Image (cartoon, rainbow, N blue to C red):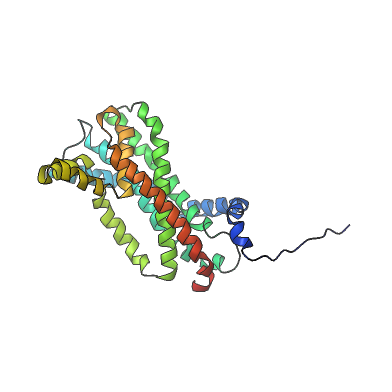
Amino acid sequence: MTPTYKLVLEPGRTAKNYWRDLFHYRELFLILAWRDVAVRYKQTSAGAAWALIQPLMNVVLMTVIFGTVAGLPSEAGVPYAIMVCAATLPWQFFSSALSLASQSVVNNGNLISKVYFPRMIVPASSVVVSLVDFGVACSILAGLMLWYDFWPTWRLLVLPAFVLLAIAAALGSGLILTALTVRYRDFRMIVPFLMQVGLYVCPVAYSSAVIHDKLVQKLGSSLGDRCFLLYSVNPMVGVIDGFRWAILGSARAFYWPGFILSVGLTAALLWFGVFYFRKTERAFADVI
């Protein structure tokens, strides 16, 4: 008996079933993620070792320049290299994920213009590539802890929650920049510049406690605390402080007001990223 099919044409049906389609196209998500992971370092002489070389060089340079030459203090006796590495890992993940996500739709233009699937799969799969690099780079932190005989506490168990927060920040920002890059190709130049500036704006090479102490010293306790709370508007400040709190253990106090503000803004950024991306993705095939 020949099977019969029913074709339904209904306005708004695609938008209504968008999240269901995301689940149905999960195999495409895995294929794109695996493809990007496989070809990322395929034609490089060092191969996957670049996932270790880049963060390791950042840790060494920042430790020498900011810790030794500039003489910036570490946190409660923690080796400066470990403090820097605990911040370099989330920042490297965020920077890489944002850069890859912002170019993902443009780089997959042929696929976008030929077949239908939820376009959000493309930037989301590129974040997985950076997450794999992040997992590999964690071995640098483990090696530094063994070298300095520094052992984490039970707080390390909370680290996955901060990883999820970093993923949310990267995905929310990536969705916005992806949609903007499709329409305005100038963002291909702007994103690398933003990452260079962000490396110094975020407390990667130094402790956020240094910023807080300087603000209190210059502006007074009340105004200094308010300015530092404003500094915490940057979502990566909460992520980096969270990583250091979990990895450095009892050696670091936690600034809860700034972290709560960072979490709230990250959630808002993710919501707006999804909203803006879905609003503009219908025109991607025409613009590309």
Residue 14 lies left or right of residue 152; in this view the side is: right
Whether 60 is drawn above or below 104: the answer is: above
On screen, 226 above or below 121? above
Q: As drawn, which residue projects farthest toward the bottom?
A: 286
Location of residue 149 with respect to 58 vertically, above or below: above
Q: In which quarter of the image is the N terminus?
A: bottom right
Residue 57 in sight here: yes
Instruction: Work out whether residue 199 or residue 241 is closer to the camera in this orientation and state it.
Output: 241
Front-most of residues 140 and 245: 245
Q: Quadrant of residue 239?
A: top left
**Residue at figure coordinates x 43%, y 56% from the top left:** 272
The location of residue 39, given as percent across then percent down, is 48, 55
Is residue 33 depicted above or below 279 in this figure?
above
User: At x 43% / y 70%, what residue is drawn?
Assistant: 183
* Extreme residue toward the front, this view: 222
Q: Which residue is found at the position 37% from the left and 46% from the top?
A: 264
Residue 185: give x, y in percent of width and height: 39, 70
The outermost residue toward the right is 1
Residue 41 visible, this angle: no
Q: In which quarter of the image is residue 143?
A: top left
Question: Measuring 26% from the left and 56% from the top, which residue is drawn there?
Answer: 197
Q: Nearer the viewer, residue 85 or 270?
A: 270
- Tell me if 235 is positioned left or right of 125 in this view: left
Residue 174 horizontal/vertical position (percent): 42, 56
Image position, residue 215 (x, y; %): 15, 45
